[in-house]
Image: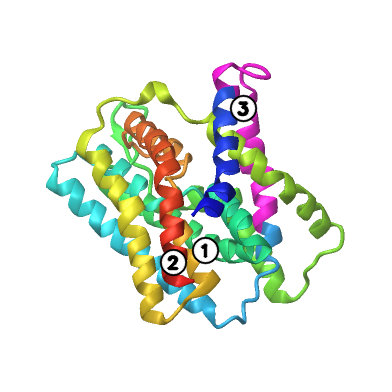
Amino acid sequence: MFSLSMAIIPIFLLLMLGALCQRFRFPMEGFWQGVDKLTYWLLFPALLFYKTSQIDFSNPLLASYALILLCALIVTALFTFASAWLVGAKAPTGSSMLQAGVRFNTFIVLALAGSLYGNEGLIYAALGASVLIPSVNVFLVVSMVLMHGKPSANEAGSKVYPSLPKLLSGALIRNPLIISIVLGSSLNLLGVTPVPVISDMAELLSKAALPMVLLAVGASVRLDVIRSVGMTFVLSTMARFMVFPAVIGGMCWWLGMTGLPALVAILFGVVPTATSAYALARQLGGDAERMAAYITLQTILCVVTLPASVWLSQWVFG
């Protein structure tokens, strides 16, 4: 347990350092918003491209990995929908609860996988990301449009709703993480990787991605938006930190998956929700302020829950 905590502590220190830099506006006002864009549009896509171009798609674990993670997504979503209905949450609050339950912070997953399990862990984490990132984006856009849509004003001043295909294309085609996964996986399947110069450049960028991403995630923590989020936060956090990893663990046990693949899969269920959930809440009519509170509180809470969850998964799966 002590050695596990020592491996995780540097990650949280980077998160705290990012939060302190943002708090004192170091090195300048607006700097971390720029870093956030840099990591989202360049550094992290380079990391995902480089890792997915290395994945062995002939690995018999691939189908099982996809099944495990997608089942966890579905069960967690059903739990969150039921929870929102039980507490009588309105659609914007319900959709923010849904994001808090099923979204995961890919940046922290990859940082943990690399810190705890080395390069092989990073490759499994990239495999999981290649399954979950497109699936979660499609699922959330469809769900949020069905729940409340995205109103906009036409020339007559009345509200209209954009078509679902238009929203989906915007969420998928413009997402640099999905583009990098598709590109890396496609070149891998075609057998043309590593690509001269491009793969080397992507590898160099990927080395800068994780520390910069963790600093940027820390800088995005917003203590000023924490209000009385009440039972909706409790239920959505149960979905994120309990239901999601429990389903992954149960599926791994049922399919006989142990060792490193199982341990990395569980990481997707024990990290906080993604900071990008705030932007999607604003775009599609969710409760953005409540979403910001969920992100902040889950990020703070996982400082306590994450070491215990990882230790438990290592004790169970070896």
Q: Main secondary structure of the magenta part?
A: helix
- Residue beneath the point at 54% across and 27% down: 19
User: Going from the N terminus, do you reach mark 2 or mark 1 first?
Assistant: 1
Secondary structure under badge 2?
Answer: helix
In three-dimensional space, the C-alpha distance between marks 3 and 2, rounded to whole angstroms, equals: 38 Å
Q: Nearer the viewer, mark 1 or mark 3?
A: 1
Which residue bears the numbered disc 1? 264
- The answer to whether residue 284 shows anywhere in this view is yes
Amino acid beneath label 1 = Val
Q: At numbered mark 3, what does the secondary structure look like: helix, strand or loop? A: helix
Q: Amino acid at mark 3?
A: Trp
**Left or right for 210, reference 161:** right
- Residue 179 makes an appearance in the image: no
Q: Are marks 1 and 3 in contact (CB under 8 Å)?
A: no
- Compared to 315, does 105 lie above or below? above
| Number of the label disc, if any, that sits on residue 217 | none
Tag in front: 2 or 1: 2
Mark 2 to mark 1 CA distance (whole Å): 14 Å
Q: Are marks 2 and 1 in contact (CB under 8 Å)?
A: no
Q: Position of residue 125 (x, y in %)?
A: 57, 61
Q: Badge 3 is on which residue?
A: 32
For label 2, the residue is 315
Residue drawn 29% across the image and 25% down it: 227
Q: Which quadrant of the view contains residue 215?
A: top right
| Figure quadrant of residue 51 | bottom right
> Magenta residues?
21-48
| Other-residue count near label 1 (Cα within 10 Å), few / some / many at <14 / 14–19 / ≥20 | many
Q: Residues within 10 Å of mark 3 (few under 14, many from 20)?
A: many
How far apart marks 1 and 3 lie (CA) works out to 29 Å
* Observer-nearest of 228 and 149: 228
